[in-house]
Image (cartoon, rainbow, N blue to C red):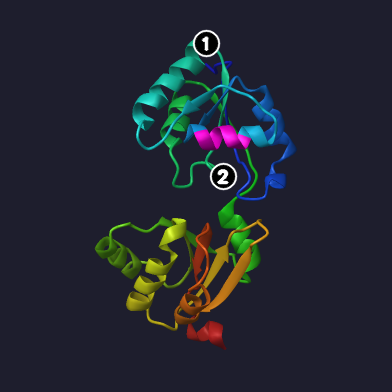
């Protein structure tokens, strides 16, 4: 039986605050509370749009117990909630999937409120064929594990990676070591913001172009290796 409660999964801007959708604003205004990763970030997002709502924290440190607690609030009190991430579309390498799954299992309707996505924004401006691509997520923070993960990246698809702002140089260094200096890639830096830049080239060129780049969010797209047929 479907509960009267609802969980809205709401995308928020990745940089430019004007990228919020009308539906997202309406949803955030109408729900009983908002679920976010960090109180400071969640409060800042809502404050930009003059919205005040109670916040429930759900992050990698408390996901199991908080998912159960929030589920009980939704079930027992008949409330509605919006799940947001720190930026962009929730649940890509973010906590919350367990809560969404439990809502499905307990008859609570889960509603998508789509909007900004750093992955899709990067693909839009990359200039690559996007009929097929692979989202590879985050590489391991440990260097030895990262090197092994890079070795396993498929070569026949354009591969999208997300990474912490301070880890661009180590990623480029390790990719040059494993994949060679001539492998082509795209770096989409500070998407939707005034400082937005798109860097296109081989790994060595990208390393040089971004050497003095201030720390900032980026999406990394590793270009597939073209077959002989594709090069004709």
User: Which residue is nearer to you in this view: 75 or 116?
Assistant: 116
Magenta: main secondary structure equals helix
User: Which residue is nearer to you in this view: 51 or 183?
Assistant: 51
Horizontal and vertical percent position of residue 195: 64, 62
Question: What residue do we see at 52% from left, 58% from top?
Answer: 216
State the residue position of label 2.
Answer: 89
Horizontal and vertical percent position of residue 219: 52, 61
Tell me if residue 136 comes above or below residue 103 in the rendering. Answer: below
Instruction: Tell me whether the residue at label 1 lies in contact with that at label 2, contact meaning CB atoms closer than 8 angstroms.
Output: no
Horizontal and vertical percent position of residue 91: 49, 42
Tell me if residue 91 comes above or below residue 8 in the rendering. Answer: below
Q: Secondary structure at mark 1?
A: helix
Start and end of the magenta stretch?
40-45
> What is the quadrant of the C terminus in the image?
bottom right
| For marks 1 and 2 on the same chain, the one whose residue lies earlier in the sequence | 1
The answer to whether residue 9 of the structure is visible from this angle is no
The number of discs equals 2
User: Of all residues shown, which one is farthest toward the top?
Assistant: 76
State the residue position of label 1.
Answer: 77
Horizontal and vertical percent position of residue 174: 35, 71
The answer to whether residue 91 of the structure is visible from this angle is yes
Q: Is residue 171 left or right of residue 50?
A: left
Residue 44 belongs to magenta span:
yes
Residue 73 belongs to magenta span:
no
Q: CA distance from mark 1 to mark 2?
A: 27 Å
């Amino acid at each position: 039986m479907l509960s009267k409660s609802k969980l809205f999964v709401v995308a928020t801007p990745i940089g430019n605050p004007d990228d919020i959708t009308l539906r997202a604003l309406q949803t955030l205004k109408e729900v009983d509370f908002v679920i976010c990763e960090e109180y400071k970030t969640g409060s800042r997002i809502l404050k930009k749009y003059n919205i005040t709502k109670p916040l429930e924290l759900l992050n990698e440190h408390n996901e199991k117990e908080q998912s159960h607690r929030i589920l009980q609030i939704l079930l027992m009190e008949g409330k509605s909630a919006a799940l947001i991430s720190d930026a962009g579309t929730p649940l890509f390498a973010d906590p919350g999937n367990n809560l969404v799954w439990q809502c499905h299992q307990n008859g609570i309707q889960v509603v998508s409120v789509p909007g900004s996505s750093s992955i899709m924004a990067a693909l839009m401006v990359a200039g690559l064929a996007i009929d097929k691509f692979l989202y590879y997520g985050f590489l391991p923070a440990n260097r030895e594990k990262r090197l092994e993960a890079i070795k396993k990246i498929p070569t026949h698809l354009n591969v999208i990676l997300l990474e912490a702002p301070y880890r661009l140089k180590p990623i480029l260094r390790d990719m040059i070591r494993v994949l060679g200096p001539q492998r082509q890639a795209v770096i989409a830096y500070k998407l939707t913001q005034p400082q937005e830049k798109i860097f296109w080239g081989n790994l060595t060129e990208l390393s040089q172009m971004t050497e003095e780049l201030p720390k900032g969010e980026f999406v990394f797209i590793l270009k597939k290796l073209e077959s002989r047929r594709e090069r004709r």
